[in-house]
Amino acid sequence: ERCRWFFVLAPIVSHEDGHVIDYNSWKTRGWCRFERLARKLTPATDTSVLVIKDDTTFWQAAADQWLYEPVGCGSFTVESDRATLAIRLIDMLERKLQHLAASGSSSEYRRWMASLASLFRGLPIDCRSVRTSALTNMFHVSEVDEFLKTVRLSSAIGKVHGTSALLIAAGLGNVPVVTA
């Protein structure tokens, strides 16, 4: 939360076991994916990730790579780290959602809520079992009106900034709301 810049130093080098490592190998690692996601979960307005390959080559990583390369689907040397990161992810996500709710960023709030199933994919936790204050209603509310209030939508029909109540409920696996 306190850093202004986030750099990934990923030169092309030979690993001691002989294979080549670079940015592509960096983003396959679970802890590296977690660091990248942690950057996105900060309340900062600029959450860009800058990749440095060498002294003349750098670029900004794609903004939503975290969505398609979830932490839990990364590689881990220590398998129990998945559970550790699941707990940390819940804490960070809770803070992000509280910040978005307090700042009135409803569309971004809904975007994160629609992404929950992807965020927790591969982690040893069912995102529907998360029981933190901002997340509980998302998975467990069965009344459409209460669900709409939780996701800050006024209607079950239609889209707001490309997001609909149905999209969010389906992504969360909230069957009672989807079938209502």
Image (cartoon, rainbow, N blue to C red):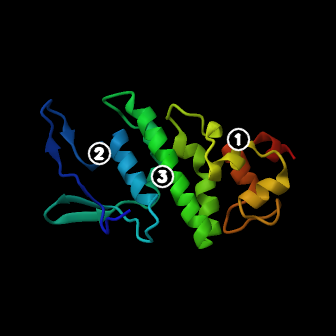
Q: Please report whichever mark, 3 or 1, sits nearer to the chain's N-terminal start.
A: 3
Q: Which residue is mark 3?
A: 92
**Residue 3 in view, yes or no:** yes
Q: Can you identify the residue that label 2 sits on? A: 26
- The amino acid marked with disc number 1 is Gly
Badge 1 element = loop
Residue 25: x and y in percent read 29, 42
Residue designated by label 1: 173
In terms of image quadrants, where is residue 8?
bottom left
Seen at 38% across and 46% down, the residue is 33
Mark 2 secondary-structure assignment: helix
Q: Earlier in the sequence, mark 2 or mark 3?
A: 2
Q: Position of residue 7 (x, y in %)?
A: 27, 60
The residue type indicated by label 3 comes to Met
C-alpha separation, residue under disc 1 versus residue under disc 2: 31 Å
State how far apart marks 3 and 1 are (Cα): 21 Å
Q: Amino acid at mark 2?
A: Trp
Q: Is residue 115 above or below residue 173?
A: below
